[in-house]
C-alpha cells in the first residue's frame, strides 16, 4: 500500500489554510502545499507532484469542482484523487461530488485533530479498492 505524503490544498479562506496546515503538518506528518486560488494551484501542479488534492468547493473565480474538471483534462494529473471540503453539508451536493469521482467530502468546520485521519481513511479505502 502506498503511503500518502504529499497533499495540495486549495482554499480561499486564510483561516482554513492555517488550521488545515497545523492539522496536517503538525498533528500529522503530511507535506502540504497550499494555495488560495485554483489558478495558483494549477500553476504549481507540476512542481508539487501531489498524491492527493484537497479542494474547497466554493471559491471565487474558480470553484473546487471547476478546478477538478481542469485537472482531469491534464494527462499527467487526471488520476490524482480529490477530496472536497465544504461548509454546505447538503447530501445532494456531497452525493454529486462523490458520483463525479471525489474520494470523499469533508464538512467544515472540521476537527483539526482528526482531519488527517479522515484523509488517511479515504486514501486507504481507495488503495484497498485499487489493489483488490
Image (spheres, rainbow, N blue to C red):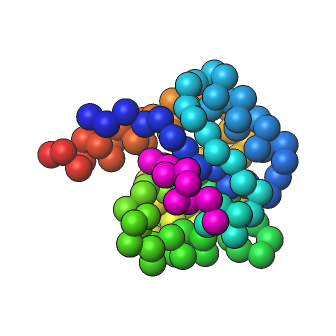
**What residue appears at the point 55 percent right and 54 percent down from the top-left corner?**
47
Q: Nearer the viewer, residue 36 or 124?
A: 36
Corner quadrant of residue 120? top left
Q: Main secondary structure of the magenta part?
A: helix
Q: Is residue 89 visible?
A: no
Coordinates of residue 38 in the picture (x, y in percent): 68, 66
**Figure check: 95 above or below 4:** below
Q: Nearer the viewer, residue 16 or 36?
A: 36
Corner quadrant of residue 66? bottom right
Q: Is 103 left or right of 17, judged from the image as shown?
A: left
Coordinates of residue 83 in the picture (x, y in percent): 53, 53
Q: Is 106 left or right of 11, judged from the image as shown?
A: left
Coordinates of residue 96 in the picture (x, y in percent): 50, 69
Q: Is residue 47 magenta?
A: yes
**What residue appears at the point 63 percent right and 21 percent down from the top-left corner?**
27
Q: Magenta span covers which residues?
A: 43-52
**What residue appears at the point 82 percent right and 52 percent down from the top-left corner?**
13
State the residue lying farthest toward the left.
132
**What residue appears at the point 42 percent right and 42 percent down from the top-left corner?**
122
Query: How many numbered circles are shown?
Result: 0
Q: Is residue 86 magenta?
A: no
Coordinates of residue 48 in the picture (x, y in percent): 55, 50
Q: Nearer the viewer, residue 91 or 85?
A: 85
Q: Is 64 left or right of 76, judged from the image as shown?
A: right
State the residue lying farthest toward the top.
27
Q: What quarter of the picture does the N terminus occupy?
A: top left
Q: Is residue 43 visible?
A: yes
Amino acid at each position: 500500500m502506498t503511503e500518502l505524503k504529499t497533499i495540495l490544498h486549495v482554499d480561499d479562506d486564510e483561516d482554513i489554510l492555517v488550521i488545515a496546515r497545523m492539522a496536517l503538518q503538525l498533528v500529522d506528518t503530511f507535506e502540504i502545499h497550499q494555495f488560495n486560488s485554483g489558478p495558483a494551484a494549477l500553476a504549481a501542479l507540476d512542481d508539487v507532484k501531489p498524491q492527493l488534492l484537497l479542494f474547497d468547493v466554493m471559491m471565487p473565480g474558480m470553484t473546487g469542482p471547476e478546478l477538478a474538471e481542469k485537472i482531469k483534462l491534464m494527462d499527467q494529473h487526471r488520476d490524482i484523487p480529490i477530496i472536497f471540503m465544504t461548509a454546505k453539508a447538503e447530501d445532494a451536493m456531497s452525493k454529486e461530488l462523490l458520483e463525479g469521482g471525489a474520494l470523499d467530502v469533508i464538512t467544515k468546520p472540521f476537527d483539526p485533530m482528526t482531519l488527517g485521519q479522515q484523509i488517511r481513511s479515504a486514501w486507504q479505502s481507495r488503495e484497498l479498492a485499487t489493489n483488490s
